[in-house]
Amino acid sequence: MMVATTTSRVQNSSAARDNEHIREKTLETIARYENATHRELTYHLAELDREWDIERVLELNFSSVVLLGIALGTFSNRRWYLLPAVAGCFMVQHVIEGWCPPLAILRRLGFRTADEINRERMAFKTLRGDFADAGASGTGETSTTSVLHAAEA
């Protein structure tokens, strides 16, 4: 059994089309804000701070299934106690491998990893001018791709 690295395990376990779709949406967002004011960029950075990453969503999902299984097992039928056991196995699998059955659905819905959110955050800080030398082209303009590339470096 091989333990996946923390920063890349979800992306490595996700379908390439889902990863590419998330990256394209990030590029579209950066392009939309390319000529935004300092205030607009700061507002979007605050929105990124509130965005739930996929780990948080999986933790909520796992906790909800465990609580539901315990409640149903207690008040309905003892067979429902299997639900938290299965959910626990999925969570262990996710922790070790970076994959679990709900992951594919959540990625398709567009939930991003903390690393993907942080890349967009760094790109927006670059657009805002927080890093004067990062992502600028020779003409003094900033291209969407170079900004994201600088954030991914």
Image: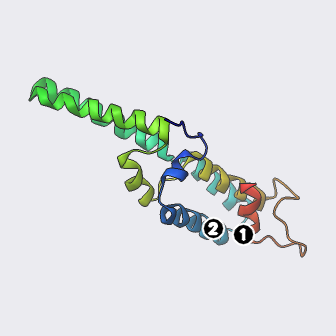
**What numbered label is drawn on residue 1?**
none
Marks 1 and 2 sit apart, C-alpha to C-alpha, by 7 Å
Residue depicted at 49% across the width and 35% down the height? 1
Q: Can residue 24 be seen in this view?
A: yes
Query: Going by the picture, which residue comes out furthest to the front?
Result: 1
Question: At x 48% / y 62%, what residue is drawn?
Answer: 18
Identify the residue under disc 1.
145
Is residue 90 left or right of 77 when viewed as pictured? right
Query: What residue type is disc 1 on?
Result: Thr
Tell me residue 33's x, y (percent). 67, 68
User: Which residue occupies 12% across, 26% down?
Assistant: 78
Q: Which amino acid does label 2 sit on?
A: Leu
Image location of residue 38, percent across then percent down: 74, 60
Q: In this view, does 74 lie above or below 83?
A: above
Name of the residue lying farthest toward the bottom: 139
Look at the numbered discs 1 and 2 and tell me whether their residues touch, using CB distance below 8 Å: yes
Q: Position of residue 116 (x, y in %)?
A: 60, 53
Residue 143 relative to residue 81: left or right: right
Q: Which colour scheme is used?
A: rainbow
Q: Mark 2 points at which residue?
A: 27
* Residue 35 seen in render: no
* The image quarter in which residue 60 lies: top left
Q: Is residue 123 left or right of residue 74?
A: right
Residue 101 as seen in the image, left or right of residue 79: right
- Say which quadrant the C terminus sits in: bottom right
Residue 38 vs residue 118, the one in the foreground: 118
Give above or below for 13 relative to 149.
above
Q: What element carries label 1?
A: helix
Extreme top residue here?
A: 74
Q: Of 34 and 22, which appears nearest the observer?
A: 22
Q: How many labels does the image show?
A: 2
